[in-house]
Amino acid sequence: LGPLRPRRAEGPVTPATAILTASDRSARGERPDAGGPAMRAAVERRGWSVAEVRVVADEQPRIEAALKEWCDGDAVRLVLTTGGTGLSPRDVTPEATRAVLDKELPGFGELMRQRGLKSTPTAVLSRALAGSRGRALIVNLPGNPKGAVESFEAVADLIPHALAMLTGGDHANAKGAA
């Protein structure tokens, strides 16, 4: 049979993505959702598929339910949220996310805020966070479409590596996935 060879990485992970916009006004139909479509375009530019885009009110139980539904199913590996990361009393996306996470990934939030500072000093007011639930990765993004896309782009190259690690890959094999 010959010598055993190390398994090669199977190439980049191209995650099926779900996008959740947390916005009271968009959920009530008072204004169109701009964050969800902006994120869909950014995800598709990378060649990743979008399984679903949904809008919910800024209510922790609704946000938690959507995150659990997607992460606990088999179709979605990446959940991007937009909105609800600020300081308003109704901004509860980080709290909803933290409540459903298995592991928090502080470096993603730190990197998004650091990169955001290049565009606006208010980037440090974002409470966005990221982490894993099962084999899925959740990343909170700002509600502003420009800020959401910039934050996503700050961490997007790390997402395939993180997803490979969530499925038991090691760092050597996961490097080929980034």
Image (cartoon, rainbow, N blue to C red):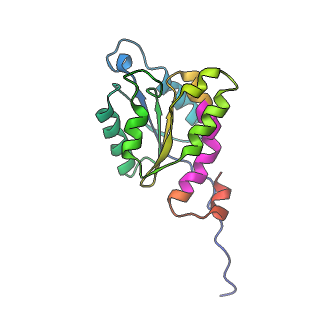
In magenta segment, residue 160? yes
Residue 53: tell me if it is visible.
no
Stretch of the chain drawn in magenta: 151-164
Position of 118 relative to 10 (above/below): above
**For residue 129, above or below residue 23:** below
- Identified at 58% across, 47% down, the residue is 159
**Residue nearest the viewer, comparing 141 with 76:** 141
Q: Position of residue 22 (x, y in %)?
A: 40, 27
Magenta-drawn stretch, dominant element (helix, strand or loop):
helix
Apparent side of residue 29 relative to residue 110 in the rendered image (left or right): left
* Picture coordinates of residue 96, whole percent (x, y): 37, 37
Residue 42: x and y in percent read 58, 32
Q: Is residue 101 left or right of residue 59?
A: right
Taking the view exactly as shown, the residue that stands out farthest to the bottom is: 1
Q: Residue at x 53, y 21 (%)?
A: 144
The quarter holding residue 148 reads top right
The quadrant of the image that shows the N terminus is bottom right
Comparing 165 with 100, the one in front is 100
Q: List x then y, in percent, for residue 150.
A: 62, 29
Q: Work out whether residue 109 or residue 133 is closer to the camera in this orientation and state it.
A: 109
Which residue occupies the foreground of this view, 18 or 60?
Answer: 60
